[in-house]
Amino acid sequence: MSGVRVLVGTRKGAFVLSSDGTRERWDVAGPHFPGWEIYHVAGSPADPDRLYASQTSGWFGQVVQRSDDGGVSWAPVGNEFGYDGVPGTHQWYDGTPHPWEFARVWHLEPASTDPDLVYAGVEDAALFRSVDGGRTWQELSGLRGHGSGPRWQPGAGGMCLHTIILDPRDPGRIVTAISAAGVFRTDDAGKTWRPTNRGLHSGGIPDPDAEVGHCVHNLAMHPSRPDVLFMQKHWDVMRSDDGGESWREISGDLPTDFGFPIAVHAHEPDTVYVVPITSDSHHFPPEGKLRVYRSRTGGDEWEPLTTGLPQRDCYVNVLRDAMAVDSLDECGVYFGTTGGQVYVSADAGDSWTPIVRDLPAVLSVEVQTLV
Amino acid sequence: MNTVIRVVLPQHLRTLARVTGPVELAVVGVPTQRAVLDALEARYPVLRGTVRDHGTLRRRSFVRFFACEQDLSHDPPDTPLPEAVAAGREPFLIIGAMAGG
């Protein structure tokens, strides 16, 4: 029987939410790693029992946990993320040079072909790869070293590499996004990189059309159409039809185009989801109404999805890695809030139900579809 | 000469190391912070990077070392530990600093 496993990272631990294909009754397991910030939990597409979790603490640093039994038991693996060579400097908030310093892993991206191959996006921004199931990590230093690194500047949440998109057609192509530097692409498995930000326009930087410096919040891709990328930027929802070579705005009739996550329907490559947030100074939904917006036209035209979501007095946020979809026949959509709710829609967004209401602030949500 | 040092870990590191109480570590030669932490990380490799940074081996900012009602956090790492710690009468405390959370 098919089912789903929802992997939730929170400010105070990880939770695993499980259900059968109806997605009506849920088993809640956790907290795993109680008291630690869990930035991300991700499952391997090659082996659904293989999970990775980024466990971090301002006191005790970074731990990476691995499960080989679907999240029932966990064991720490390697936590040494050493920058390649002399790390150099990026810009600090005040524009002065600041040495690259590892802070934490924001995002883990297991490869689709090999459960031991996994990528980690870290703060200060860099991409690491492990080929031994997380025991050791090597930096793909061509990203930091391609030339624009000294001009990168942290966003409000730190200078993090938060999005890693692996092209299912071509193992050499990886697209990453960094706040606040922008999108970068490699076509040779991480040896060489270049910025791919043409068409982005950001009002908060000296040159709004600069090659780098854009605060990209999240990217999404449908695996059947890897050249089409969707982006939620600090402001603006954007789309590329050429693998990031150029971008155009698709914010259309959204009530606000500020937000954090973006996701694509599992079976409809032109159905896209965002959660509009009032502004960069008001990190909560407009009018106190929590609304997911769905476009069935690949952008520009958006409809609010409200059934089952609070439509008054709601002032939570939905963070960049906190929305995901399953791939059951009727696509399920999930998101978690800073108020500790995790919502599920088993009908592609038409209606929503809280799975849990009172977790710690949710940092990330991923879904595994189990068959 | 081997000296046995009692080390008390904060709760989160006890969980990581899968221990429930103080740990006893045999230290060769004069016991110092560096010698104790080297022995700790050798016994419990999972703690590498959680008390001291990888590479530099500098104490993490929000970790403190206390013993005999003194804050030893800012002592050079090769300073001998107090005699009462070396003699096993007092533990060496690794503390998560009070910094919110």
Image (cartoon, rainbow, N blue to C red):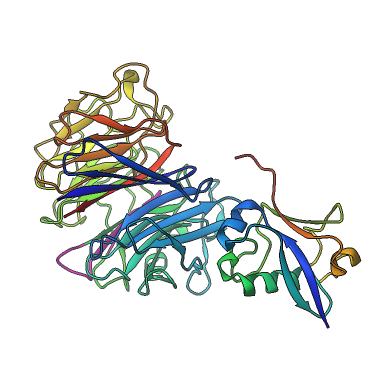
Magenta-tinted stretch: A167-185
Looking at the picture, does residue A16 appear above or below residue B29?
above
Pick the residue in front: A74 or A235. Answer: A74
Which residue occupies the foreground of this view, A106 or A97? A106
Which sits in the foreground, A89 or B77?
Answer: B77
Q: Which residue is depicted at the point 63% across and 39% down?
A: B100
Left or right: A136, with B92 as reference point: left
Closer to the camera in the image, A225 or A323: A323
User: Left of A269 or right of it: where is A217?
Assistant: right
Q: Residue at x 50, y 65 (%)?
A: A79
Q: Quadrant of residue A187?
A: bottom left
Q: Residue A172 in magenta?
A: yes
A93 magenta-colored: no
Q: Position of residue A339 (x, y in %)?
A: 41, 30
Residue at position x 60%, y 71% in the image = B55
Give the quadrant of residue A118.
Answer: bottom left
Toward the bottom, the furthest residue is B1
Tell me residue A323's x, y (percent): 29, 42
Q: Position of residue A254 (x, y in %)?
A: 21, 28
Looking at this view, name the residue that lies furthest to the right: B83
- Left or right? Give the position of A368 relative to B62: left
Question: From this viewpoint, is residue A339 visible?
Answer: yes
Residue A28 locus on image (x, y percent): 35, 41
